[in-house]
Image (cartoon, rainbow, N blue to C red):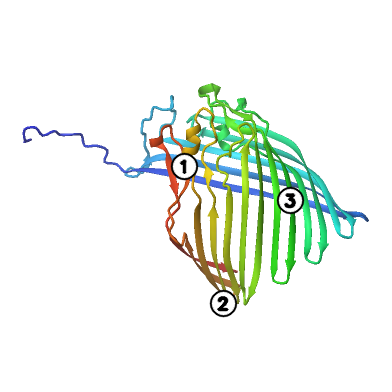
Amino acid sequence: MTAPGTRIGGTGNKNIQGIDKQNQYRVVGGIFKATKQFAPGLLRAGVWIEKSDTDRHQYDIDLTLGNIRDPRETKPTPVQNPSVLFDQQSTIKNTQPFVEFEWEATSTTLVTPGVKVANITRSVDAVVNQTTRLPQNASVDYRTTLPFLTVNQKLGAGLAAYAQYAKGFQIPDLKSFYIADPTKNSSTPQKSTNYQIGVVGKSGSFTWDVDLYQIDFKNKYVSNGLGGTAAAFVNIGGATYKGIEGQATYLVGEGLAVYANGSINRATAEDTGKTISNAPKMTAAAGLIYTQGPWSGSFIFKRTGENYQQDYDSAKPAIYELYKLAAYDNADLGASYTFRNIAEGFKALKLQINVFNLFDQHKVTSISPGKTLAGDQYTYQAPRSYQLSMRADF
C-alpha cells in the first residue's frame, strides 16, 4: 500500500555501462643510404621508407551483460551503429629519397647542400568513422621537393658558427577525414621555410650554444566552418615564428652537472599580426643532473610562458584576451640505482623512483572552448604523483 501523495518512479537501468576503447599504433621503416668519398667532399644518397598503421575503436558496452549495448542515439542522423563511437583503421605511407654533398670548402668551412623528395599517402578505412559516425574509405597523396643547406665555420679552438636553411612541410592530421567527403579537402600541404644561425662553444667543463631562428609558415590548414556535405579543410594564410634560444651545461665535478636553457619566441599570424594560439612567449628550464657509479638522479624545473588558446578574430576581439593563459611552472625529481652482474644472463637491473610536479602546482595548461563559456573545458596540471619502476637488461 502506498501513502497518499507518494510517487512511484520507474526501476531505471540496473545494468553497468562501460567503454571498450583501443588505440593501437605500429610503425615500421628504416633509412637506407650509401656514401662515396670524393676529393672535394663526401656524397650521401639514400631513402627513408616508413609505414605506420593505426587501429582505433571505442564501443559503448554493458558490463553486466558483457556485450555491446545500444544507447539508441539519434545524433548525428542517421546513426547506423549507435553503440560504436568509432571503429577506424588508418595508414601513413612515407617514402623520401634524398641526396646531399658535404663539401670541404676550406680547412675550417664545411658546406652541405642537399635535397629530398617527400611522397606521403594518408588513408583511412573506417567501418564507423569518428565524428560523422558513418563508414569512410578515403586517401590523399602529398608530394613536394624540399631543399636544404647547412654551413659550418670553425672560429677557433672549441668555437664554431653555423647557418641553416631548409624547406619543410606538414601533412594534415587525421581529423581532416572526419567529414562527409574528404575529397573536397585541399591536397596542398602546409609548408615552411626555415632559417637558423648560431654559435656553439666548448671550453673545459663548460659547453654552450645560442641561436636565432625564423620560420615562415604557409598554407595553414583549417576547417571551412561548414557542415554536412559542404564541410572541408582548406588552406588559408600562414604565420611567422621567430626567436632566440640558448642553453648551457657546466660539469661541476664528481658526476654533478648544472644546466639551463631558455627561449624568447614570437609567433604571429600573417593576416592579423596577432600572436597565434598555443605559442608561448618564452620557455625556460634549469636543473641538476647527477651520474656517479651506480647512482644517477636529476632535478628539472621548467617554465612555460603565457600563451593564447584562440586565434584572433577581429569580429570578437574580447574572446582573444579571454582565452589568454598565464605562465606556469613544473618541477620533477628522479633518482635511480643500477645493479650490475647480479646473476647469470642479467646485464643490469635498474630501480628508479620519480616524483612528478614536485611542488604540486595546479595551474591551467589549456582551454578547449565549447559552444558557450559554460561549456569550456579546462585542463590543469596533474597533481603531484610518484612512480617506481624497474628495468632489466639481458
Which of the pair 19/259 is nearer the observer? 259
Q: Nearer the viewer, mark 1 or mark 2?
A: 1
**SS for callout 1:** strand
Marking on residue 343: 2
Mark 1 or mark 2: which comes first in sequence?
2
Q: Which mark is residue 392?
A: none
Q: Are marks 1 and 3 in contact (CB under 8 Å)?
A: no
Q: Is the residue 344 above or below the residue 226 in the image?
A: below
Residue type indicated by callout 3: Ile
Q: Give percent across and percent down for residue 291.
A: 60, 72
Q: Residue at x 64, y 30 (%)?
A: 235
Residue 289 percent location from the top left of the image: 59, 68
Decide: few, some or many residues near mark 1? Use Cα within 10 Å; few <14, some 14-19, many ≥20: some
Give the class, few, some or many, for how many residues have Cα within 10 Å of label 3's Cα (few <14, many ≥20): few
**Amino acid marked by disc 2:** Ala
Using a 10 Å C-alpha cutoff, classify the residue at mark 2 as few (fewer than 14 neighbours), some (14 to 19) or many (20 or more). few
Inter-mark Cα distance, 2 to 3 = 37 Å
Q: In the shown orientation, is residue 254 left or right of residue 37? A: left
x, y percent for residue 101? 85, 50
Where disc 2 sits, the SS reads loop
Where, quadrant-wise, is the N terminus in this rendering? top left
The residue beneath circle 3 is 31
Q: Residue under label 1, please give it.
A: 367
Q: Nearer the viewer, mark 1 or mark 3?
A: 1
Q: Nearer the viewer, mark 2 or mark 3?
A: 3
Q: Is residue 369 left or right of residue 104?
A: left
Give me the C-alpha separation between circle 1 and circle 2: 51 Å
- Which mark sits nearer the N-terminus, 2 or 3? 3
Q: Earlier in the sequence, mark 1 or mark 3?
A: 3
Residue 203 lies, with reference to residue 118, above or below; the image says below
Helix, strand or loop status at disc 3: strand
